[in-house]
Image (cartoon, coloured by chain):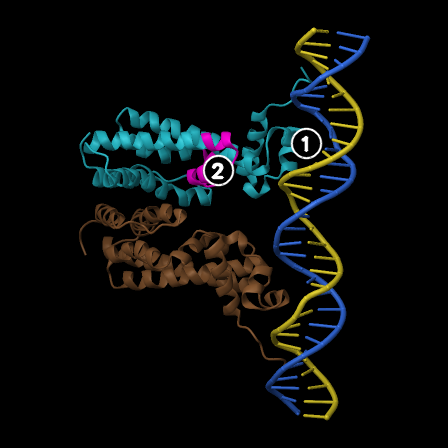
Chain colours: A brown, B cyan, C blue, D yellow
Amino acid sequence: MGRNAQFKNEEFIDAALKIAADHGPAAVTIAAVAREVGAPVGSVYHRFLSRDVLMAEVWLRVVVSFQEAFLATLQKGEGIEAALHTPRWVRQHSAESRILLLYRREELVTGAWPEDLRERALTIKRRLEGGIRNYAERTFGKTGKEEINRTVFALIDVPYAAVVRYIRLGKKPPRSIDDYIMQTYFTIMGRKK
Amino acid sequence: MGRNAQFKNEEFIDAALKIAADHGPAAVTIAAVAREVGAPVGSVYHRFLSRDVLMAEVWLRVVVSFQEAFLATLQKGEGIEAALHTPRWVRQHSAESRILLLYRREELVTGAWPEDLRERALTIKRRLEGGIRNYAERTFGKTGKEEINRTVFALIDVPYAAVVRYIRLGKKPPRSIDDYIMQTYFTIMGRKK
DNA sequence: GTTATATTAGAATGTATATTCTAATATGTC
DNA sequence: GACATATTAGAATATACATTCTAATATAAC
C-alpha cells in the first residue's frame, strides 16, 4: 500500500557522511543532504526525526564498522592486533575517521534520543565492554576495575591518543606510532598471550 | 578621556568560562555572558570582536595556565613529573579541563582569527614545541622527527588519552592512570634521567 | 564649563537553518 | 477502477542568537 519509495534511508546517511567528510559536520544541513540525494527536504524528515538523529545515524554506522573489526580481532585473542587496528583503520578510512570524533557512546546512551537509537547505541557499547571484559579475563584471569581500566587504556585510549592528532590535521598517522602503541601494549598488558 | 569602564575584559572571560563549565559551551551565548556580568550585550561587543573570539580567549587562558606549569616542570628535567602534570591538573581543575577540549592549537594558528589572537596562539604553540624539543634533545641527544614524535607521545598524547574519557564523563581521573602514564613513559622514553 | 570620546544601555535587525505544513503522486489492496 | 496511504515536493514558518545601531552617560583634558 502507498507509493514506492524513491530513495533509501541509507542514501541519506551516505550523503551526510560524504558532506561531513568533505566539508566538516557543520556543512551537513538538511538542505545540503537533500540536494546531494536529489530528494526534497520533506523526505529527509519523513525518514529522520531531526538533523541530530541523522547525524547520530551516521556516527553509529561508522562506529559499528570500526568496532566490529576490532572485536573480531580481539576475539581471536590477538590483543596487539586489536590495538593496531585503530591506526590501520584510520589510514584506510580518512573520511570516516573524522566522524568518529563527533560523538561518544555515552552521549547517545545518556541523552534524550529516540528509544530505538539509544537501544542500538547501548548495544554497541555493551558489545565493546563485553569484548574488553572478556579479553581482560583471558589475560589477567580476573575482571576487577583495575584490570578493565588497564585493558581499556592499552587497547583503546592509547591507540586513540596516538591517532587523534593526525585525524584532526587531516593526515595519515605515520608508521612510527604503531611501535609506540605496541610497546605501550606490552608494558601495560604484559608479554603473555 | 572618556567614561571609565565599569567592567573589565577579564570579567567577561570569567563569566564565559563559568557558563561553559556549568552548562557546556553551547550555553555561552552573548546574552548569557552579559547577564552573568551584569553588563549590556553592547559592552561585550565593545570588547570582543565576536563570540568566537571570546571563546578563543577563554580557551587561551586555560591552556596557558595548564601549559606553563607543564613547561616549568619539564624545564627542571623531570619528564615523568611533566607527564603526570596532566592528570594532576585535571583533578584540580575540573571546570577548566572541559574547556581544553574546545579548540586545538592548530585551529587558532591556522584559522581566520584577529592578528593579535593568532599571534598569542602561535606563541604558546611555539613555547610548547620548544619545551618538547629541548627535552628530547636532553633525553636522546638529538631532535629528529622520531625523537620528537616519541616525546610528544609519552608526554602529551598518552596523558591526554588517559584523562580525556574522565573529563567527558565529568569525573575525576582515578589514581590508577598515573601508573599507566608512568609505565608508558619509561617504556617510550627509557629509564635514564 | 565645554568638549571629545570611551563606555554603557538595550532595543532592533539580520541570518541561517531546522522544522512544519499543505498539496501532489504513485502504488498496493480490494 | 476506487481507495487508502506511503512518499515525494517544496514553499512557508519558526526560532534562536549573533550582531548592529542609536542614544544616553560619565569622565578626562583643556
Q: Which residue is mark 1?
A: B42
Secondary element type, mark 1 = helix
Q: Is residue B113 above or below residue A38?
A: above
Element assignment for label 2: helix
Chain under disc 1: B
Residues drawn in magenta: B93-119
**Amino acid of disc 1:** Gly
| Number of callouts | 2
Q: Residue at x 54, y 56 (%)?
A: A28
Q: Position of residue B128 (x, y in %)?
A: 35, 31
Kind of residue at disc 2: Ile
Quarter of the image for residue A97 reads bottom left
* Quarter of the figure with residue B154: top left
Q: Position of residue B79 (x, y in %)?
A: 27, 31
Q: Main secondary structure of the magenta part?
A: helix
| Residue A2 point in image, percent of width and height | 63, 80
Q: Which residue is mark 2?
A: B99
Label for residue A121? none
Q: Horizontally, is B165 left or right of A28 in the view? A: left
Instruction: Say if residue A20 shows up in the picture.
Output: yes
